[in-house]
Amino acid sequence: MPSLRAVPRNFMTDWGKIAEKLQLSRSSIVNMCKQAQHELHSATTLFVAHWLERIHDTRASIESMTKSWQELQHNPDPEDPWYGERELKLDEFLLRSGFIKEWELGCRGLPSLYNRETWLEWFERGFKPYVDNGPALSHIQGTRLHGEILKAVGERTGDGTYAAKDYVVRDELKRRCKPKFKSLAPSVEYSQETSQLACRARYRLTDTPYDRIPR
């Protein structure tokens, strides 16, 4: 999620105009409109916002690779580096690529837009497998979020720290993150608008000759 920071005090005078001109954070999939109530400095909120972007990218990668697999089924080309894998089923093909992990397969077929109508499906299929079967615990190890969870559900040890069983940490992580999936979700209209902005940005970058890209 793009952000902009500056030291000079007089910068704040024109902040609103600058943010509007830059369309700051408008290509983010989370709700960044003026009425948004969430606080991204919260450990749980920031963690969920990061993983929403990750789920979005994973879903897009799976969609692209699915098209490649379908093309391989209908028009097999001996010159295609994946020609030897043409007999694989789709899930096997995705896993064999090395880009998709087994716990990420739930992202296949997710609604393309994350919003107030689809947030629960993104949580159930895109996030819960990451916590239950993926590397979520190792990812949060030593972070502020992990510390907050241990302090909330763990037991105090002899050296003054807190400890908890893995399944207890997983359950608490899901309990904390689920409402954030809902609160970060933009309206349907806002998600459609930001998706169009992101598409236009990609179009400008990919279709503009290199020597004409602004520097």
Image (cartoon, rainbow, N blue to C red):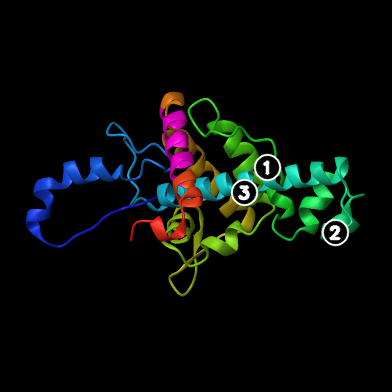
Label 1: state its secondary structure: helix
Residue type at the position of mark 2:
Glu
Q: Is residue 52 visible?
A: yes
Residue type at the position of mark 1:
Glu
Q: Earlier in the sequence, mark 3 or mark 2?
A: 3
**Residue interval drawn in magenta:** 190-201
- How far is disc 1 from disc 2 in space, using C-alphas? 22 Å
In this rendering, which labeled residue sits more in front, label 3 or label 1? Answer: 1
| Residue plotted at (80% across, 58% down) | 96
| Residue plotted at (80% across, 41% down) | 70
| Residue plotted at (82% across, 57% down) | 80
Q: Which residue matches tag 1?
A: 63
Residue type at the position of mark 3:
Thr
The circle on residue 100 is: none
Q: Does the magenta segment cover residue 195? A: yes
The circle on residue 58 is: 3
Q: Which residue matches tag 2?
A: 79
